[in-house]
Image (spheres, grey):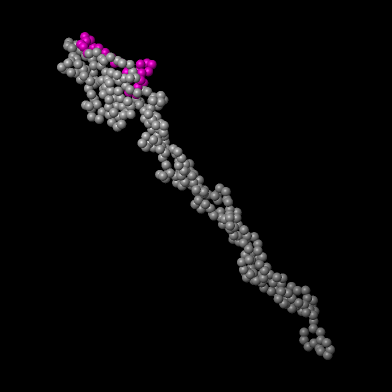
Amino acid sequence: RTLTVFTLAVCLSSPGKAQQQCTNGFDLDRASGQCLDIDECRTIPEACRGDMVCVNQNGGYLCIPRTNPVYRSPYLNPYSNIYPPPPAPGPVPNYPTATRPLMCRFGYQLDENNQCADVDECASDSHQCNPTQICINTEGGYTCSCTEGYWLLEGQCLDIDECRYGYCQQLCANVPGSYSCTCNPGFTLNDDGRSCQDVNECTNENPCTQTCVNTYGSFLCRCEPGYELEADGVNCSDMDECSFSEFLCQHECVNGPGSYYCICPSGYNLLDDSRSCQDINECENRNFTCTHQQTCFNIPGEYKCLDPVRCEDPYIQINE
């Protein structure tokens, strides 16, 4: 896209005498009495900065990108009509009105109302952005930029690896133009999408058959006394204490759910230690079934009833 600007110099007169003046961008040549164009690209230091090039125009100058074609002929533009040079200024009796050809600055074009309107290079596909870039229209021009998650390098938009910068607290997966955070087992992702919070497995759903203890990122299962944790780390099974030792009980050990107990044979009592057995003296406790003529005789675990002693002839009983 090219642009040629025409600016005319006019003469102004003041009441009482004629005074020749030039419009902005022109200097009056006293010798010839003509208005000559000022080359701002040479007279103004750094008239254009950055990646812009200065192009002198009649009565002004333009700053355009270096990549755009520049047609330096002041009156010739291959994409527009050819306009004749402005007429030489002459004295006028009254204050005239300066007129210009209907031309717009670079990046603008005439609309239906003969007003200079911004050209949307992005919509008209007249920009020079790469396929990896996006075009952003600006007033009088456009900008080539990258979408979020990409950065510009040598004219190309390259994906930013956000995982290299520690955006996630735990696990990070880079995806084109973005990233995704996940958490290790035992954690849940917070609403910020980056940090992780411990999951209390014991509160949400107790996975243990007995006691659950929450830990950072996990949990532990514990069993009540008399039970032991199985290999799966979750279930508890009864512990057979009687199989550990034959000396737990003096007589007999009986295993029960989560515990054990000792029993004694008939004729014995279990002592307070719940392990030892003691013989019951049925004769002292008068817990026997002997007759009055019989005598109770205690033996370990039981008793016997002895009949009265009878002496055979020629023997006689001398005492009871």
On screen, residue 29 above or below 205 = above
Q: Position of residue 121 (x, y in %)?
A: 38, 25
Q: Is residue 61 left or right of residue 114?
A: left
| Residue drawn at x 27%, y 21% as measured from the top left | 73
Q: Position of residue 36 (x, y in %)?
A: 21, 19
Magenta stretch contains residue 109: yes
The quarter of the picture where residue 274 lies is bottom right
> Mostly what secondary structure, the magenta segment?
loop
Q: Is residue 194 left or right of residue 251?
A: left
Magenta stretch contains residue 40: no
The quarter of the picture where residue 145 lies is top left
Q: Is residue 128 left or right of residue 14?
A: right
| Residue drawn at x 23%, y 29% as measured from the top left | 45
| Residue drawn at x 62%, y 70% as measured from the top left | 247
* Nearest the eye: 286 or 278: 278
Q: Position of residue 1 (x, y in %)?
A: 35, 23
On screen, residue 225 above or below 176 = below
Any part of residue 96 in sight: yes
Q: Is residue 255 left or right of residue 15?
A: right
The quarter of the picture where residue 66 lies is top left
| Residue drawn at x 26%, y 13% as measured from the top left | 97
Name, please, the residue furthest toward the right: 313
On screen, residue 52 above or below 237 = above
The stretch in magenta equals 89-117
Name, please, the residue furthest toward the left: 31
Name, please, the residue furthest toward the front: 78
* Nearest the eye: 153 or 30: 153
Name, please, the residue furthest toward the bottom: 314
